[in-house]
Amino acid sequence: MGELKKGVAYIVIGVSELARSVAFYRDTLGLPMQFEQGGLAFFTAGPVSIILSADLGRARTPVAGAMELVFPVENVKRSWRALAAAGDTFFREPRQVTEKDWAANMHDPDGHFLTLFGPPGE
């Protein structure tokens, strides 16, 4: 199956309320939105695109599954402080997870795991 060597192009996430999740991924996380059409919202997330899907959210209960999106950041502590100041709640504060990298964990509106990952910063 050589075609799989091209990597992942899209990650589709089931959501319970598309508008709420669009606001979170666009306004809170700052991901560029490509477009919204037919119950789907497409976002640029580096070399892959994230697609929010209301249909997928209705097809699975609970919506949040064993899935985690990891967002590389230049400064975990600064990113964590900015998101926390905007009212986002982290269930794990910044901490060292590898010899050089730190992580902080939060949920999106449907309970999917999101991780900030990278150098600790100041």
Image (spheres, grey):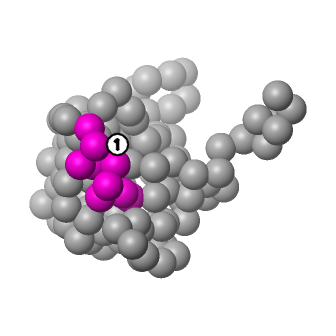
Where residue 85 sits: x, y (%)? 17, 62
Q: Looking at the picture, does residue 50 appear above or below residue 119? A: below
User: Would you name the residue on which mark 1 appears?
Assistant: 114
Q: Please state, as top left, top right, bottom left or bottom right, where the N terminus lies in the image.
A: top right
The amino acid at mark 1 is Leu
Please tell me in which quadrant of the rendered image residue 47 appears: bottom right
Tell me which residue sits at (82%, 38%) in the image: 3
Q: Position of residue 91 (x, y in %)?
A: 18, 35
User: Seen in the image, is 19 located left or right of residue 74?
Assistant: left
**Place of residue 120 in the rendered image (x, y in percent of width and height, measured from the top left):** 44, 40
* Secondary structure of the residue carrying numbered label 1: strand
Residue toward you, 23 or 55:
55
The structure residue drawn at horizontal position 34% and vertical position 63%, both measured from the top left corner, is 25
The one of 63 and 101 positioned closer to us in this rendering: 63
The crowd level at tag 1 (other Cα within 10 Å; few <14, some 14-19, many 20+) is some
Q: Residue at x 46, y 49 (%)?
A: 12
Name the outermost residue toward the right. Answer: 2
Horizontally, is 28 left or right of 118 in the view? left
Q: Quadrant of residue 88?
A: bottom left
Q: Is residue 76 visible?
A: no
Q: Is residue 56 found inside the magenta-colored segment of the image? A: yes
Magenta residues: mostly which secondary structure? Answer: helix
Q: Is residue 5 visible?
A: yes
Q: Nearer the viewer, residue 6 or 69?
A: 6
Magenta region: 52-60
Q: In the rendered view, tell whether residue 47 sits above or below residue 33.
A: above
Q: Residue at x 55, y 29 (%)?
A: 100
Where does residue 22 sit, x and y in percent of width and height? 31, 68
Q: Is residue 47 magenta?
A: no
